[in-house]
Amino acid sequence: MIQSEQRGGLVQLTIDRADKANSLTEAMLRDLTAVLDDAAAGDCRAIVLTGAGKVFSAGADLAEAKAGLAKSPEWERLSARLATMPCLTIAALNGTLAGGAFGMALACDLRLAVPEARFFYPVMKLGFLPQPSDPRRLTQLVGPSRAKMILMAGARIEAAEALDWGLIDRIVPAASLMAEAEALAADCLAAAPDHVTAIKGLVGQR
């Protein structure tokens, strides 16, 4: 389930299915995209995306994955919506990031992670292709060889290595993760929405 909270120009989205390692159903993907559509049309200057509990997301819900969710276009719609948001987007990774959930984090502008977070995308092992935009975004961050290590060799990356590779931008203790995300958003929250959009455009959309 997706929890949405807006305070001023900040929208916090929480994947709230901790009893299932925040695994994602097709309905949850659609809900996330719809909330982001609404935020993009409103007075939103920063988005913080996080998870409940100690895992950010294990990726696709196992039962729905077997029924075809792994190949659903909803993953690509969601990551495209995140990548084209007119505001600052921050993935506050409260724990492990796996599988199709990678796309959300890769499409964000900034990625923070707790020290305990692990990163893996086992598409080769499972016999699926990654979502279309994920390899490109991953390669932009870590380079082609390391992208192949994750996507083809099934490498499991710990937080310190992810930081060294450029997959994440900072490691933050769990107790201060959300405070750090909000601190990074502070300048955007104090600015006019069109100024935020203009600077993001100058840097370049993901």
Image (spheres, helix red, strand yellow):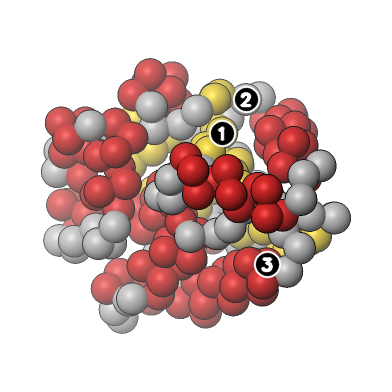
State the image quarter where residue 186 is shown.
top right
Q: Nearer the viewer, residue 117 or 141?
A: 141
The residue singled out by tag 2 in the image is: 172
Query: Does 28 sit left or right of 179 as displayed?
Result: left
Query: Does 25 sit left or right of 198 as displayed?
Result: left
Question: Label 3 crowding class (10 Å Cα cut-off): few <14, some 14-19, many 20+?
Answer: many
Q: Secondary structure at mark 2?
A: loop
Numbered mark located on residue 112 in the image: 1
Question: Which residue is located at x 76 percent, y 63 percent?
Answer: 43
Mark 3 / mark 1, whichever is N-terminal: 3
Numbered mark located on residue 85 in the image: none
Mark 3 / mark 2, whichever is N-terminal: 3
Q: Which amino acid lies under the numbered mark 2 shown in the image of this protein?
A: Val
Q: Residue 140: horizontal and vertical position, in percent?
A: 29, 38
The residue singled out by tag 3 in the image is: 39
Mark 3 → mark 2, Cα distance in angstroms: 26 Å
Q: Secondary structure at mark 1?
A: strand
Question: Label 1 crowding class (10 Å Cα cut-off): few <14, some 14-19, many 20+?
Answer: many
